[in-house]
Amino acid sequence: MYSRAYKSVVSVPPLLWVAAFLLLPYALMFAHSLWAVREGIIVHHWNLNNYKTLFTNPVYLEVLSRTLRIAASVTICSILLGYPLAYYLAFHAGTRKELLYQLVIVPLWVSYLVRGYAWKTILGSDGVLNGFLQYLHLTHEPVGFFLYSPFAVVLMLTHIYTPFVFLPIYAALEHIPRPLLEASQDLGAGSLQTFWRVILPLSMPGLLAGATFAFVLSLGDFLAPLLVGGPSGTMIANVVQSLFGAAFDWPLGAAISVGILVITISLLFLS
Amino acid sequence: MSANSTSRRAPLLALYAVFVFAFIYSPIVVLVLYSFNRDGVGGFPPRHFTLNWYTQLFADSSIWDSVLNSLMVAAGSVALSLTLGLLAALALDRADFPGKALFRRLVLLPLILPGIITGLSLLMFAVFAGVQLRLLTVFWGHGTALISVATTELFAGLQKLDRAQEEASLDLGATPWQTFWRITLPNLKLSLIAAALLIFTLSMDEIAVTFFLIGRDNTLPLEIWARLRLGITPEINAISTLIFAVSVALIVIWYRLRARSLGDRSQEFLEQLGETS
């Protein structure tokens, strides 16, 4: 029912824009990863050395494995917090369900940076948590290891991604037909059995979607380590950032970025 | 028995839910509380109430310059990404063209990929094209990256649309252009407002892409970032509290808008057409 002219008017502008300003930049990133730096200048000499460095230099491999560990911890913590919350809202919250749901959504609108900053003021050695612990006489000296550690990064990212993990899980739980649960109980399954055999498998797609999201976004985060991570909390994206900054090795930085991109996209395809 | 067994009390689970909410909200509460604390951020409990940090904030012109910059970038990004996103959604919904599957995935990439990758790719493009980094490049980056959000929201809106209205309009002799303005667009109003609010908020808050495309003029998040490097000041608590208040106000406005029934203008237009033809 739509004319040829209508179809071209709606498809040509976004197609051109996306080709020029998304496809081309991403392609440029890939091209850079195959170039080299000589005497501070990027030369268009096609080679695979950047990837060789990436896979053989122990420094990069160590940072990468730390990044994967942090991202995995964030994912697990977010699920441990988000799943029971979603379960409670879906099955036990009764009339307060709508209000509680909105309460989970609101923090999503609070700036990422603002929340990171809040954690910084809480965890610092003269921060709120240390003040609180000393006020309760639980400690007498400021505890130094809260801030500037991988732990702080995991805490901050878990705080940010828990609502994101909650949302798809909650949606999945809400879609489970209630008669199925009744059938399971009527046929003699206990609550725990119903959970393991019915609820958990049926909510798995939501769980996987949330987990992938948390993992992928933590994997490429460079702001949390800068805010609360310190040197021991450095992640792979910080390496990229420094290669594009002071270290000036765009080709190597681009190769690592392509690596992050490949991990991200393959995870999205898998889930 | 089974009906109330699914909604029976679960005190342990309820307690855990309270704990999760406490975890989610405690940083925000701390942030707001300490913006009124005379002795600044840190220590416990906050003892003396003051509005000094807010007075200091209101006198701080570089913060307000950055707020203005952010507002300009966000408004521009809404206009750009909403226009292109609407076209893209229409194209995905109703046109077939070579590379459609690739296009659909490509548009979504900035939403899925970590911000640093999109930010750096755009930076390389800007450098390659010899463009100087300034507020305009930030607007370009936000606008382009957020087409993903606009397309997703508007495509979902189009899928729910009653196609019969458009057919009726065309059959009754309206031009495609008239049909677009009087039927398609009014019916998409809610999705358009939702997308605009979402894009505006995301742009105001964006930092990963902005980080690489910024010139000399800071957006608000980058201004805050620059100050954080110098150390913690309660002024940041004050501005953060204000941002939080504005965000909550926006959410309330959004729910009011959604709750109010939107008069069906397109139906009126169809009736008019029916009378004249």
Image (cartoon, coloured by chain):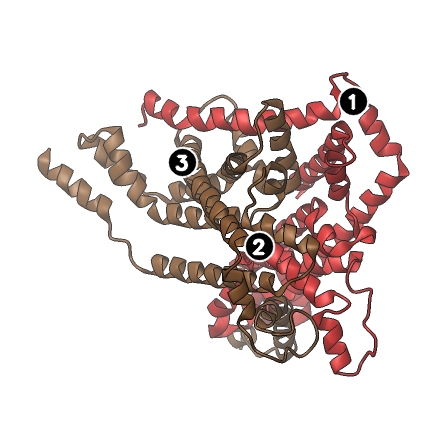
The one of B167 and A231 positioned closer to us in this rendering: A231
Q: Position of residue A15 (x, y in %)?
A: 48, 26
In this picture, residue A36 sits left or right of residue B49: right
Q: Is disc 1 placed on a helix, strand or loop?
A: strand
Dot in front, 3 or 2 = 3
- Give the CA distance from mark 1 to mark 2: 43 Å
Chain in red in the render: A
Kindly check if marks 3 and 2 are in contact, taking CB atoms under 8 A apart as contact.
Answer: no
- In this image, A168 relative to A67: left or right? left
Q: Are marks 3 and 2 on the same chain?
A: no
Q: Residue furthest left?
A: B276
* SS for dot 3: helix
- Which residue is the site of mark 1? A36
Judging by the rendered image, the residue that carries numbered circle 2 is A168
Q: Nearer the viewer, mark 1 or mark 2?
A: 1
Residue found 51% across the figure and 60% down from its top: B59
Chain B's colour is brown
Image position, residue A252 (x, y; %): 78, 30
Residue B235 horizontal/vertical position (percent): 58, 63
Read off the residue under disc 3. Answer: B83
| Amino acid type of the residue tagged 1 in the rendering | Ala
Left or right, B12 with reference to B106: right
Q: Circle 2 — which element?
A: helix
**Quadrant of the snapshot with the C terminus of chain B:** top left
Task: Say whether residue A35 is visible.
Answer: no
Give the amino acid at mark 3. Answer: Thr
A177 to the left or right of A140 = left
Does B113 sit above or below residue A190? Answer: above
State the separation of the CA atoms marked 3 and 1: 39 Å
